[in-house]
Amino acid sequence: MPPQRNSARRGDAHGSRAAAKRIDSNRADMVAIGLNATDTLICVPRFPAFDSKAQILSSSLLPGGQAATAAVACRRWGLRSRYVGKIGDDAAGRLQREEFAREGIEAHLIEVPNCASQLAFIIVDQCTGERTILWQRDDRLDLRPEELPEEWIRGARLVHVDGHPCAPAAAAARWAREAGAVVTADLDNIYPGVEELLEHVDFMISSRDFPERLLGLPDLLESLPEITRRFGCRVSGATLGRDGVLAWDGTQFHYCPAFRVGTVDTTGAGDVFHAGFAYALLRGDVLPVILEFSCAAAGLNCTALGARGGIRPVDEIEQLRRGGIRHQRLYADEELRRAAARAVTTTPKDSSSKK
């Protein structure tokens, strides 16, 4: 073979290997886009009454945030997970950077100069484990679509967003679906652009109150099917705290009661629920198992302090999922069957937002 041709082929092979490495470096199981926060957990004997004094039992500074915590949980369960978000140029921002590195998470962190990172002061009632959150966040911490690492998003199997804010989340969701990935969303409030975001979401599991805020329908048995009809989500659901989770898949409702655990702190329960949902979905589980795994993961996280304090190994979550004691059911099976029959025959209330 002439030397020049051999040289050209070596160059082609080298270029192919380099391209393959670039493609592989962009691949991940899940990419989480949204909030990180530094939480100050303040434990008190009971939630203080107005105009009173309360003793502090303990105070801890811990990392948290919806999308950030979901990424951490998935990484601990063995997935290659990534995080995209903004931090300030302060000690809290450094803590976030250090925690992602310690967890082995690839993080695309944009540091905003002369800006404080998001902070939360969380009062935890020792009697119940329930918490009240006081938070502070500078608007400069909002991501912009042009700041997203598009190659990361197109290389993911799953993209998880929390809608903080909605414009970059919608862009990421659109790119992800174009590349064949699935999109999950953790939504808890009505933010500008949330309807556009929903049009690109496959699995929407929100807080209990979000569907009513979005549609004005107080009954989840009506609002969840309406979200599916209007925006085209494959599954629309809502977490219900101690009552578990309710989801609609377009033909039937799936309800999973929560597990009974020794609750210490409910901080981060929803974030870990969404991590469990992403993990079980990528594992290929059917929806009822996905919901059970997510509830078990969230329940165990409540047995320790902080948003990430009770993230347990998969085998412990599976043990609770298979044999754990449940709270009393909020919905009876027959009620769900009747509601499903009504939902599949209901005319969409407004089809203008449907895909």
Image: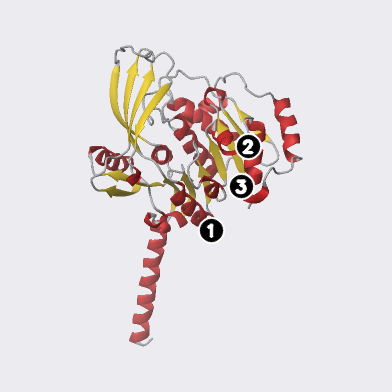
Q: Residues within 10 Å of mark 1 (few under 14, many from 20)?
A: few
* Residue 139 visible at all: yes
Q: Residue shown at 70%/26% (left/top)?
A: 333
Tell me where residue 249 sits by quadrant: top right
Q: Between disc 1 and disc 3, whose residue precedes?
A: 1
Q: Give the x, y percent position of residue 292.
A: 56, 31
State the separation of the CA atoms marked 2 and 3. Answer: 11 Å
Tell me the tag on residue 351: none
Of residues 349 and 316, the one nearer the viewer is: 349
204 to 2, vertically: above or below: above
Q: Which residue in the protein does label 2 denote?
A: 224
Tell me the tag on residue 231: 3
Type of the residue with mark 2: Leu
Q: Between disc 2 and disc 3, whose residue precedes?
A: 2
Nearest-to-viewer mark from 2 and 1? 2
Q: Between disc 2 and disc 1, whose residue precedes?
A: 1
Q: Which residue in the protein does label 1 denote?
A: 178
